[in-house]
Image: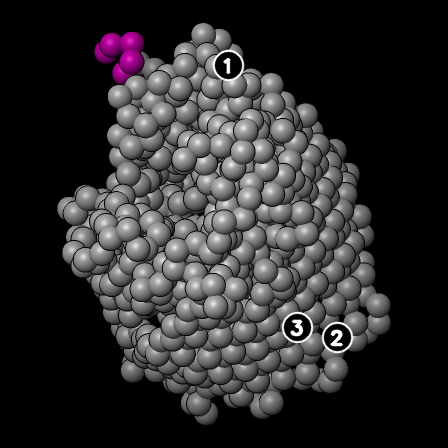
Amino acid sequence: MNRRHYRCALMVTAAVQLIAGEQAFAQSAKDTSPDASTIIVTARRIEERLLDVPISISVVDQSRINKVNVTSSEDLARVVPGLGVDSRYSSEQSSFSIRGFTQQLRTSAAVGTYFGEVVAPRGSGLSLQGGDGAGPGSTFDVQNIQVLKGPQGTLFGRNTTGGAVIITPTKPIDRFEGYVEGSYGNYSMRRIQAVVNAPLASWARLRLGVDRQKRDGFLHNISGIGPNDFNNTNYTALRASLVLDLGANLENYTIVSNLWSHNNGSIPQIFGANPAAGFGSFAAAQVARRTALGEDGRYAVENTLPTPSSLTKQFQAINITKWIATDNITLKNIASYSHFIQDLRQDIFGSAYAVPLTGGYLSTSFSFNPDGSHSSDQKNFTEEFQLQGTDSNGRLNYQAGLYYEHSTPGSRTAGGSPGIGVICLPQDYNDFLHTRCLASPRSFATPNSGTIEFINMAAYAQGTYKLTDKLKATAGIRYTYDRVHGSAQGLNYGYVGAGYVTPTFIGCSAGYPAATNCVFSGRTSNKKPTWTLNLQYNPSDNTMLYGTYSRGYKQGGVTPFAAAGVSTFGPEQVDNYELGMKASFKGEVSGNLNVAAFYSKLKNQQILVGLQDTTGVHPSATSVLNAGKSRASGIEVDGSIRFGRLFRIDAAGTYLSTKLEIADPGFPEYNVKTLPASGGPIEFSPKWSTNVGGTFTLPMDESMGKIEVGADYRYTSSFFTGGIGTTTPIKQIDANLTWSNVAGAPIDISAFGTNLTNQFTYGYVLGLANSFGFNVGYIGQPRMYGLRAKIRFGGK
């Protein structure tokens, strides 16, 4: 027996001894970990056992969120294989992707995010993406987070072609309890949470919570311009929930939340240069400066904006009224109002190209909103009425509803920067009009401002009928009407005169008529049905087999900053076919296993492209075209095995195969640039993603509390992100240690660490070497670690 086999034999023998010896501690080590037969989810808008829902679902409860330190959308992707996150601009603007369905810039979400049964606040999406996701502070004090995979177009509506992420906050209960929790970690991470739950009367319950976190950035700015670091964290989230029992069967539930986040924003790193193209010679010098720093240059970036920042303000109020009219009928009304504001000032490519003898820098691409305006400012109102019921013999469960959503601009959103290639001073300007650049034939700038409005109305119905005690059939349909109206003002400025000068107004940008004060408007509307058909067979109480066919769609829209004729795009549509199995088992060894195989066909795919004018009449533009179709297929597996009460193994994995087919968009007056390659994979579609972890509970007397030690290994293969960009494969180890009820006191302490091997990764790569002369990558988090202490009070 060689040394490797000998080690394996020792490990197996030790594990067997631990499992066998565990019986001696059966009375003191209680297994409180949830399994599929006890987890309650709301994936079909009603409470059901996870094991009974014929949908591929991953569930992350609050205990898991705490152990692995999930504080943002990016962190959630660490623990759910197959869930992708695009956070290239900041964590406040993250959007999710599932099964290859992702959100292009200036389009609606492909994966819907819901908090407290209401869709996440929209951003305007006129330029850079904002809103539509789970921002900081949304993952504290929650019951669980459910990730639904595949189209959810019947009960959740359009813009869920990839799936949905459902965040369920903890509801007020009828006893006094709460906790205070503090965390400290590397990069000067400091976080404090506090929650208090109080019964105000026999018919009123209140829950208040706050989550405050600050952390230094892990990207070091070596340009000497602007802040010392990027990708820092600085937010405060507040939440208040109130439940009122207005009658014996009438309940009113209100959730009010507020988020304030202000940090330096995110910035990419230039890591490759092509001196033969574009700005390649400047990029090569920047890469050389960074590599000369050796190990200190791995997380080094450069910037030419003196005051870059990302400021997000989000308010949301949700009111849910539930009336149990009879034993068989329940009526529910869900209304919400939200306001999302974001100000973004960012060096898009992270370039610092100094021009000798001029004292200036080459402008590549910036995004900043002028003082007095916002990058995104959107108000959202939703109203949904539901009817849920069962027939007299309990064989039919049904629900129906009406939905209305209206998203309006709070103000005109604005942005602008000097044109690419203009030489400018890196001065402290807060407004495009105060930039100072050198005059030349190419010295120009085109600030834009605009608004966008969304209206959505839908009616839906879905029912599940028990054909036999073991066989159920489900059918559901939704009919949706969407309307989008957008307008934009396009102005053309030039830098005229000697030396560094401020911009001078020249006239309307091409495509923006002077007769309307340089304002262009576009409108589009869609009417689409979506549906689901499902058969579910339960050979036993803890085993289910199912097959589903579903139709979903993502709404069309308007890109008013694009030229007339290419400013609107239509909806994209997906057909999904899925077979799955769910099972749980109990005994000396217990656990659960879930398997789903799927095949999806997408047509009229929305693709972001660059359009170059060939006539000299139209401006070049970036717009969204319905130019593609694609297919995606794969297998999703997750499960857990519990060896007695002391040891648990959790594993999940996704295999995904995607193929994109591009149709000729057919614009005779434009050359279509940056069109993805036909036959290649879809963006944000890693072929493999896995997560394997174990948790060991120390055998100790219950009076001393419970100590759990856990570790996870996660792997995500590289994937395509647009152009010629491909990310770094992720191979990382996370670990955590938690001591609950320390010495019998209501105190929990824990330690956590992520990316313990400190693997360097690019989470998003934009390959521009053949055009701009450089490649840029958004860097993933380095090793993070910290300690947490929690004091609980009240309760049972």
Q: Position of residue 112 (x, y in %)?
A: 45, 60
Q: Which residue is mark 2?
A: 244
463 relative position to 660: left or right: right
Q: Main secondary structure of the magenta part?
A: helix
Q: Position of residue 197 (x, y in %)?
A: 77, 58
Which SS class for mark 1? loop
Select label 3 or label 1 by which is in front: 1
Q: Position of residue 377 (x, y in %)?
A: 60, 58
Q: Which residue is mark 1?
A: 357
**Residue under the point 23% across and 50% down:** 614
Which SS class for mark 2? strand
Say what amino acid the circle numbered 3 marks: Asn
The label on residue 319 is: 3
Q: Give the quadrant of the C terminus.
A: bottom right
Which SS class for mark 3? strand
- CA–CA distance in space, label 3 to label 2: 11 Å
The label on residue 463 is: none
Whether residue 679 is visible, yes or no, is yes
Q: Give the quadrant of the N terminus.
A: top left
